[in-house]
Image (tube, rainbow, N blue to C red):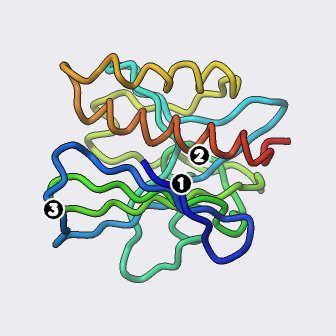
């Protein structure tokens, strides 16, 4: 994993290079993820059937900007209307022939709306849950435990652990 300053501001770009990276990529996907913190607790998406946690967010669509993507994904997954900040962190992941760009935005809560999950999210029993920042960092810190059983979860937990520890280090949690 390497780190580099980005744009001279508060935003950093971090890289996670998987053992299976081919050395170049032919596919790119950008995702925008919303960080919502209240009273030292963070709003997460939780899959009740798999026991899997994730920061709310998802793929950038061709007709939207990054903040709109973040707001849409948070609303769809959690039923929370938000106003995203500037991007505060980017994590680029490299696996096989893919580059996965993950942009993280702090969000202010503006209201509530109905949750609109994908079929896969419904099957997994996805629901919004508030959890303490320390507790979720501890859960994500166990990413290596999944190395032999669930590579997708291992990679996601490593990414989310990296994001939350970096944002904590940058003293961005209030």
Question: Which residue is rendered at x = 57% and y = 19% of the image?
Answer: 138
Question: Which residue is rendered at x = 38% and y = 38% of the image?
Answer: 156
Given residues 46 and 12, the one toward you in this image is: 12
Which badge, 2 or 1, comes first in the chain's sequence? 1
Given residues 133 and 82, the one toward you in this image is: 133
Question: Which residue is rendered at x = 70% and y = 55% of the image?
Answer: 106
Picture mark count: 3
- Residue 154 drawn above or below residue 50: below
Given residues 170 and 75, the one toward you in this image is: 170
Tell me whether circle 2 and circle 1 mark residues in contact (CB < 8 Å).
no
Which quadrant holds residue 130? top right
- Could you say where residue 54 lies in the image, as x and y percent from the top left? 47, 36
**Which one is in front in this view, the residue at disc 2 or the one at disc 1?**
1
- Could you say where residue 150 lies in the image, as x and y percent from the top left? 22, 25
Cα–Cα span, label 2 and label 1: 15 Å
**Which one is in front in this view, the residue at disc 3 or the one at disc 2?**
3
Which quarter of the figure is the C terminus placed in? top right
Dot 3: element:
loop
Which quadrant holds residue 102? bottom left
The crowding category of the residue bearing disc 1, from other C-alpha atoms within 10 Å (few below 14, some 14 to 19, many at least 20), is many
Instruction: Report the residue marked by disc 3.
Output: 97
The crowding category of the residue bearing disc 3, from other C-alpha atoms within 10 Å (few below 14, some 14 to 19, many at least 20), is some
**Which one is in front in this view, the residue at disc 3 or the one at disc 1?**
3
Instruction: Report the residue marked by disc 2.
Output: 79
Instruction: Report the residue marked by disc 1.
Output: 33
Dot 2: element:
loop
- Residue 54 drawn above or below residue 31: above
Which badge, 3 or 2, comes first in the chain's sequence? 2
- Could you say where residue 46 lies in the image, as x and y percent from the top left? 47, 28
Cα–Cα span, label 3 and label 2: 34 Å
- Residue 107 drawn above or below residue 128: below
Q: Indicate left or right for 33 with 40 as reference.
A: left
């Amino acid at each position: 994993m390497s780190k580099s300053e980005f744009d001279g501001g508060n935003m950093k770009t971090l890289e996670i290079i998987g053992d299976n990276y081919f050395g170049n990529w032919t596919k790119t996907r950008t995702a925008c993820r919303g960080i919502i913190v209240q009273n030292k607790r963070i709003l997460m998406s939780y899959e009740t059937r798999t026991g899997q946690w994730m920061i709310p967010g998802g793929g950038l669509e061709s007709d939207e900007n990054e903040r709109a993507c973040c707001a849409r994904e948070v609303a769809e997954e959690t039923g929370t209307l938000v106003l995203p900040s500037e991007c505060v962190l980017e994590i680029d992941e490299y696996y096989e022939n893919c580059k996965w760009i993950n942009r993280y935005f702090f969000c202010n809560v503006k209201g509530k709306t109905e949750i609109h999950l994908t079929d896969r999210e419904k099957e997994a029993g996805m629901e919004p849950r508030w959890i303490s920042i320390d507790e979720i960092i501890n859960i994500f810190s166990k990413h290596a435990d999944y190395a032999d059983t669930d590579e997708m979860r291992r990679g996601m937990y490593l990414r989310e652990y990296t994001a939350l520890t970096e944002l904590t280090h940058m003293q961005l949690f209030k």
